[in-house]
Image (cartoon, rainbow, N blue to C red):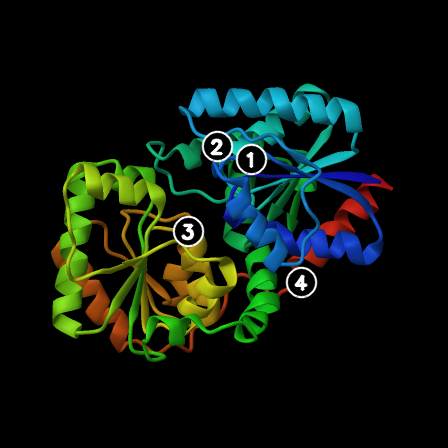
């Protein structure tokens, strides 16, 4: 059995890390194909090193561009690699352009596709990620649903029950494996001179938020309102897209502490010790739930409704009044919710299913 693991963004590196570790543990033959979607392979290399993963066998260095340009360059590069290597299955994760390109390229050359984190839906087609999720699910041979709700969504769309496997989410494996490791590193808490449980963490980067002037301005206004009411430092590791937009809009949020993007272990440590997370990231919603940190999501919808169901998260949209109100509510809640994403064995289950199906 020969496995191709396609990834291209830092969240994919994190969520695929349990798969890579399990393949290594079992001595399976695999290769990693990195599309370079996040523009800087050097930055991604730090994630590989921290997570003690083997370097990518292929790096396409795709870089920025429109969705069509980026996906097209990926398709060309992935197809060439797959025709050369002839794997039995291609594993893709999540909902990025790398995910879509990996699934399409494999399908076109008749190689089976396994989609990790299948069945997520926000029901907002304005999000490019939503379109990617749907297309990938419908061309995959193996659908690894992280939750019962995701499994029901796949069945409701007419996908064959025999293709669907309930595995839990590899983010639980990754958080459990890496949070303890993060404690052994230089503490970001000390470096930033903040106290555990006495600061808020912010991440805002999604295209539909930062590229929309009105939405981005309202989010910043809401965050500044939260900062003034609670008088907690508000740490914002700012994504290059968001930083560029702030500069273009001449916005200078004085009450937010903007810092450079962090490596994964530092971010995990900062996240796990925060009092509250305000985010538009799907992965951060999951991580906060697993780490038992209250979360307020700065979006109108979420493809992680399980976090809403268990009470670890609330949707605030971009209305400043809603942002402050949902923050108040989440700070009053107990953090004894149930983790809906599994017990940290998703990587093992996925690789075991691949072995049984392909052998």
Q: Which x, y percent locates residue 103? A: 61, 30
How far apart marks 2 and 1 lie (CA) works out to 8 Å
Q: Which x, y percent locates residue 359? A: 87, 42
Give the labeled residue for mark 3: 282
Determine contact: label 2, label 1, CB under 8 Å.
yes
Q: Quadrant of residue 177?
A: bottom right
Q: Secondary structure at mark 2?
A: helix
Please state the total of marks drawn on the protein image. Answer: 4
Q: Nearer the viewer, mark 1 or mark 4?
A: 1
In this rendered view, identify the residue nearer to me: 129 or 200.
200
Give the labeled residue for mark 1: 99
Q: Quadrant of residue 178?
A: bottom right
How far apart marks 3 and 1 lie (CA) works out to 16 Å
**Mark nearer the N terminus (3 vs 4):** 3
| Left or right position of 134 against 92 | left
Q: Can residue 78 be seen by looking at this rendering?
A: yes
How far apart marks 2 and 4 lie (CA) works out to 26 Å
**Mark nearer the N terminus (2 vs 3):** 2
Q: Secondary structure at mark 4?
A: loop
Q: Secondary structure at mark 3?
A: helix
Q: Which x, y percent locates residue 85? A: 79, 29
Give the labeled residue for mark 4: 345
Give neighbour class at mark 2: few <14, some 14-19, many 20+ (Cα, 10 Å).
many
Give the labeled residue for mark 2: 132
Give neighbour class at mark 3: few <14, some 14-19, many 20+ (Cα, 10 Å).
some
């Amino acid at each position: 059995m020969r496995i191709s693991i396609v990834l291209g963004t830092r969240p994919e590196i994190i969520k695929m890390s349990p798969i890579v570790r399990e393949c290594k543990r079992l001595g399976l033959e695999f290769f990693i194909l990195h599309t370079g979607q996040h523009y800087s392979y050097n930055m991604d290399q730090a994630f590989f090193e921290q997570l003690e993963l083997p370097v990518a066998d292929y790096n396409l260095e795709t870089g920025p561009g429109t969705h069509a340009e980026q996906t097209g360059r990926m398709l060309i590069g992935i197809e060439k690699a797959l025709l050369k290597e002839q794997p039995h299955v291609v594993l893709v994760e999540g909902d990025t352009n790398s995910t879509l390109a990996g699934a399409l390229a494999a399908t076109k050359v008749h190689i089976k596709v396994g989609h990790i984190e299948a069945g997520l839906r926000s029901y907002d087609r304005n999000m490019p990620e939503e379109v990617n999720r749907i297309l990938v699910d419908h061309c995959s041979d193996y659908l690894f649903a992280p939750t019962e709700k995701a499994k029901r969504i796949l069945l409701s769309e007419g996908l064959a029950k025999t293709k669907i496997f309930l595995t839990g989410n590899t983010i639980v494996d990754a958080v459990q494996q890496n949070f303890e490791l993060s404690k052994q590193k230089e503490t970001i808490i000390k470096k930033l001179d903040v106290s555990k449980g006495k600061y808020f963490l912010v991440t805002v980067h999604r295209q539909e938020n930062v590229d929309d002037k009105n939405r981005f301005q309202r989010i910043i206004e809401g965050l500044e309102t939260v900062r003034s009411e609670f008088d907690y430092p508000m740490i914002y590791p700012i994504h290059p897209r968001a930083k560029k937009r702030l500069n273009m809009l001449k916005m200078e949020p004085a009450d937010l502490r903007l810092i450079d993007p962090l490596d994964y272990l530092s971010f995990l440590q900062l996240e796990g010790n925060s009092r509250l997370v305000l985010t538009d990231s799907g992965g951060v919603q999951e991580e906060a739930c697993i780490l038992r940190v209250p979360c307020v999501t700065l979006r109108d919808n979420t493809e992680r409704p399980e976090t809403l169901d268990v009470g670890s998260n609330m949707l605030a949209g971009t209305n400043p009044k809603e942002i402050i109100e949902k923050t108040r509510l989440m700070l009053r809640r107990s953090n004894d919710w149930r983790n809906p994403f599994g017990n940290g064995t998703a990587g093992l289950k996925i690789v075991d299913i691949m072995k049984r199906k392909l052998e």
